[in-house]
């Protein structure tokens, strides 16, 4: 196929139309291919020799992070610009773990002006240079700091309490002792700064519920959100069915 092929992974018709009109102003021979979810986007991207992609993050079937992970596993030369209204730390954290070394990519917030969005996309797809939104860079700094970034097991603990799991159920799901569960939770509270809040609060006789406080802080930081928790709930329900099926009834 001649010309410049750009794959747009976007389920929102208005956002897709915005990009379509923006590309028309480039005065280049651009052919746009649209995918309305991550699964379709992956199939289409794998048919391109050098995929140039603009991808939303929150999409049905497969989100933008999962799509990028699967594509980069097969083609590390793929150039992807994530464009989203979200700068949640959970996405920034996940993205940092999947970008291959020396891979060109970008992250631009939808709240930017049309000119800035166009500049960011051109920088990545045409100039082969990374472009990260300044607001996202701030989140990257926090997510990459050893004293505030969550480890995998701390994030796992956060998801579990966000889903309302008890210590006993967390222990069963994660193959831990109750003491192991408490150790993970204490480490999580420490990273979120809640242990210090608790100490200061106890001095005035107004202690926090640590679990609820952790979820509140995590929501403000963008470590969890309703979109991803819906996915995590599905994963948990699948595990719960297997767990119940493995319990032998008493004789």
Image (cartoon, rainbow, N blue to C red):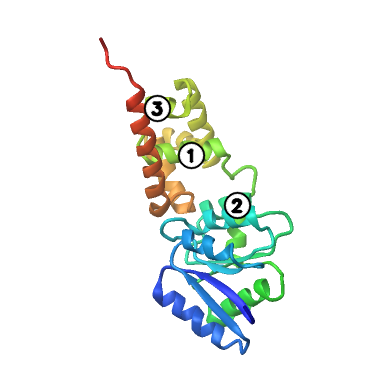
Residue 143 tag number: none
Q: Disc 2 on helix, strand or loop?
A: helix
**CA distance for labels 3 and 2:** 29 Å
- First of labels 3, 1 by sequence position: 3
Q: Residue furthest right?
A: 102
Residue at the spot of label 3? 167
Residue 29 versus residue 33 in the image, above or below: below
- First of labels 3, 2 by sequence position: 2
Residue drawn 58% across the image and 68% down it = 53
In this rendering, the label closer to the viewer, 2 or 1: 2
25 or 107, nearer to the observer: 25
Residue at the spot of label 1? 194
- First of labels 2, 1 by sequence position: 2
Estimate the x, y position of residue 80 in percent, counting from the top left: 61, 65
In-image side of 167 versus 80 (left or right): left
Residue 142 tag number: 2
In-image side of 184 versus 50 (left or right): left
Q: Quadrant of the C terminus?
A: top left
Res. 249 image quadrant: top left
Residue 106, can we see it?
no
Q: Disc 3 on helix, strand or loop?
A: helix
Residue 157 versus residue 27 in the image, above or below: above
Count of labels in the image: 3
| Other residues around mark 1 within 10 Å, as few (<14) / some (14–19) / many (≥20) | many
Estimate the x, y position of residue 5 in percent, counting from the top left: 60, 76
In-image side of 8 versus 241 (left or right): right
**CA distance for labels 2 and 1:** 16 Å
Q: Disc 1 on helix, strand or loop?
A: helix
**CA distance for labels 3 and 1:** 19 Å
Estimate the x, y position of residue 51 in percent, counting from the top left: 62, 67
Residue 82, can we see it?
yes
In this rendering, the label closer to the viewer, 3 or 2: 3
């Amino acid at each position: 196929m001649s010309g410049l092929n750009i794959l747009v992974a976007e389920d929102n018709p208005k956002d897709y139309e915005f990009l379509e009109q923006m590309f028309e102003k480039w005065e280049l021979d651009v052919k746009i291919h649209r995918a309305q979810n991550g699964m379709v986007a992956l199939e289409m991207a794998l048919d391109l020799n050098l995929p140039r992609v603009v991808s939303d993050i929150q999409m049905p079937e497969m989100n933008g992070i999962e799509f990028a992970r699967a594509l980069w596993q097969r083609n590390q030369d793929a150039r992807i610009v994530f464009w989203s209204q979200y700068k949640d730390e959970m996405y920034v954290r996940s993205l940092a773990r999947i970008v291959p070394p020396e891979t060109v990519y970008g992250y631009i917030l939808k709240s930017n002006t049309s000119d800035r969005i166009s500049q960011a996309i051109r920088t990545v797809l045409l100039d082969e240079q990374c472009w990260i939104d300044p607001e996202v860079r701030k989140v990257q700094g926090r997510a990459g700091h050893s004293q505030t970034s969550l480890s995998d097991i701390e994030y796992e603990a956060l998801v579990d309490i966000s889903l309302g799991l008890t210590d006993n159920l967390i222990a069963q799901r994660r193959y831990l002792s109750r003491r192991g569960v408490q150790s993970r939770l204490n480490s999580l509270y420490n990273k979120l700064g809640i242990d210090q809040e608790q100490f200061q609060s106890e001095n005035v006789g107004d202690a926090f519920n640590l679990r609820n406080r952790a979820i509140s802080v995590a929501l403000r930081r963008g470590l969890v959100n309703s979109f991803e928790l819906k996915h995590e709930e599905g994963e948990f329900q699948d595990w719960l069915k297997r767990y119940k099926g493995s319990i032998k009834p008493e004789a």
